[in-house]
Amino acid sequence: SSIDYHWFYEGYNGWWLYDEQTSNDIETAYQNEELFVEVLIAGFIYVIDFEKMVQYRKEFPNKSRKIKRDKTDMQIKGIAGLRTR
Ligand code: V3L
């Protein structure tokens, strides 16, 4: 089921997990086959673009990060900037 999936954004040499609320919002939009969804991250609006599979701050569309949806969350740097390894 969709509960088994995790959402990640790219960091330096690795991937970060989204915080749980944001991850749930992204997964819901993805399941609804939206082309993109806007989420609030640390006070800024970010666009999650499901076609290009990138995220970017709405005000800075040309500075994007890759995102991915995957079943495993074994090799992450941490969650939303909080290191777990
Ligand atoms: N969730 C939390 N913070 C984010 C997210 C997000 N989805 N997207 C961007 N930021 P930008 P390393 C990241 C933060 O893309 O060492 C990591 O979470 C982003 O934080 O230019 O490079 C780490 O905290 C960055 O601080 O809009 O792997 C940090 O980078 C800021 O928003 C370092 O990670 C600007 O990102």
Image (cartoon, rainbow, N blue to C red):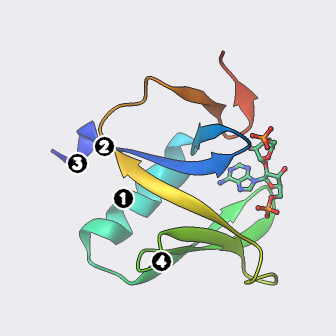
Q: Pointer 2: what residue?
A: 5
The numbered mark, 2 or 4, whose residue comes first in the sequence reads 2
Q: Which of 16 and 22 is in front in this view?
A: 16
The quadrant of the rendering that contains the N terminus is top left
Point out the frontmost of discs 2 and 4.
Answer: 4
Answer whether labels 1 and 3 touch (C-beta < 8 Å): yes
SS type, badge 4: loop
Task: Classify mark 4: residues with Cα within 10 Å, few (<14), some (14-19) or many (20+).
Answer: few
Give the alpha-carbon distance from disc 2 to disc 1, as whole Å. Answer: 8 Å
The quadrant of the rendering that contains the C terminus is top right
The residue at the point 45 percent across, 54 percent down is 68
Judge left or right: residue 40 versus residue 4. Answer: right
Q: In this view, does 59 lie above or below 14?
A: below
Q: Is residue 46 above or below residue 11?
A: below
Answer whether labels 2 and 1 touch (C-beta < 8 Å): yes
Mark 1 belongs to which amino acid? Glu
The numbered mark, 4 or 3, whose residue comes first in the sequence reads 3
Q: Pointer 4: what residue?
A: 52
Mark 3 belongs to which amino acid? Ser
Point out the frontmost of discs 2 and 1.
Answer: 2
Mark 2 belongs to which amino acid? Tyr
Give the alpha-carbon distance from disc 1 to disc 3, as whole Å. Answer: 8 Å
The numbered mark, 2 or 1, whose residue comes first in the sequence reads 2
For residue 27, which numbered disc appears in the image? 1
Ligand 1 lies under 8 Å from the Cβ of mark 3? no
Answer whether labels 2 and 3 touch (C-beta < 8 Å): yes
The numbered mark, 1 or 3, whose residue comes first in the sequence reads 3
Q: Pointer 3: what residue?
A: 2
Image spot of residue 42 (x, y percent): 79, 55
Point out the frontmost of discs 4 and 1.
Answer: 4
Q: Is residue 46 above or below residue 75?
A: below
Mark 4 belongs to which amino acid? Lys
